[in-house]
Structure formats: structure tokens, C-alpha cells
Image (spheres, rainbow, N blue to C red):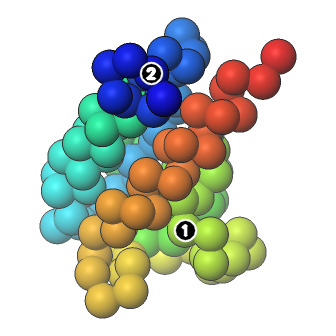
Amino acid sequence: MSITGHPLKDSTPNQPVDIKLLYTFNGPNAHQTVRLINEVAQQLCASIHIDKIKIDDNEVATKYHFHGSPTVLVNNHDIDPLHPDDSKISFQSRMYGQSGVPKRKMIFEAIQHALNINKLP
């Protein structure tokens, strides 16, 4: 643990974690998801870069393996460890359990894992 009390403060790499938020025009949970991502990044003292990508056709949906709005990719990996990569493309609202917003813990673990990967030589 660092002197500041933030466990990752001194070990955060210079390279920001790449986050893609995939959403549809009428997806109601994108803004709340971005806010949650920013809160978790601040908690981890992580430098992040968020690309908000509007999914409006099958070509873009296929390119990003879009499974509903919102989908969050951290370093190009879906944050839901239980979500199969071969799931069908969907333009529906995505559900994370009973909510349309990913769980804080899911985002936290994905960003923390990315920070650890980014530190490797």
C-alpha cells in the first residue's frame, strides 16, 4: 500500500486503460454507466480513455461484438466474465443481472485487471 492510502496510486501505469462504451441511440443506461466507470477509475486512481461508440448498424455491431446497450469493453474484453464471446449480436437493452447498468464490482475488477496487465514489461 502506498503512503497516500490508495493501493494502486504509485503503481498506476502511464498508459491509460482503454475503455469502449458501446450503446444504441435509445439505450437508457449509457450515461449512468459512464458515470460509474469514472467513479471506479477515480477510486483506483486509474488513467482511462473512454471511447463512446454509437452502434447503429449490423456492420459496426459485428465489428465490436455488440451484445446490447450498454456494452463495456476494457482493453477490448467484455467486462462480464460470464458473457460468452460467441453470443449473438443484439440491439436490445443489455441486462447485468436485474439491472441495465453493469455492477460496480464488475467494472472495478475489469479495470484493476487491465492495470495489472498494463504493468507487465
Q: Is residue 64 visible?
A: no
Residue projecting furthest to the bottom: 98
* In the rendered image, the vertical position of residue 84 relative to residue 10, given as above or below: below
Q: Residues within 10 Å of mark 1 (few under 14, many from 20)?
A: some
Residue projecting furthest to the top: 14
Which residue is label 1 attached to?
Answer: 80
Q: Is residue 62 visible?
A: yes
73 left or right of 36 in image: right
Q: Residue at x 38, y 86 (%)?
A: 97
* First in sequence: mark 1 vs mark 2: 2
Residue nearest the observer in this picture, 5 or 104: 5
Q: Nearer the viewer, mark 1 or mark 2?
A: 2
* In the rendered image, the vertical position of residue 47 relative to residue 38, given as above or below: above
Task: Give percent across and percent down for residue 81.
Answer: 62, 69
The quadrant of the picture occupied by the C terminus is top right
Which residue is label 2 attached to?
Answer: 2
Task: Give percent across and percent down for residue 15.
Answer: 56, 15
The kind of residue on which mark 2 rests is Ser
Give the image quarter of residue 119. Answer: top right
* In the rendered image, the vertical position of residue 84 relative to residue 34, given as above or below: below
Task: Give percent across and percent down for residue 75.
Answer: 61, 39
Residue nearest the observer in this picture, 95 or 57: 95
40 left or right of 111 in image: left
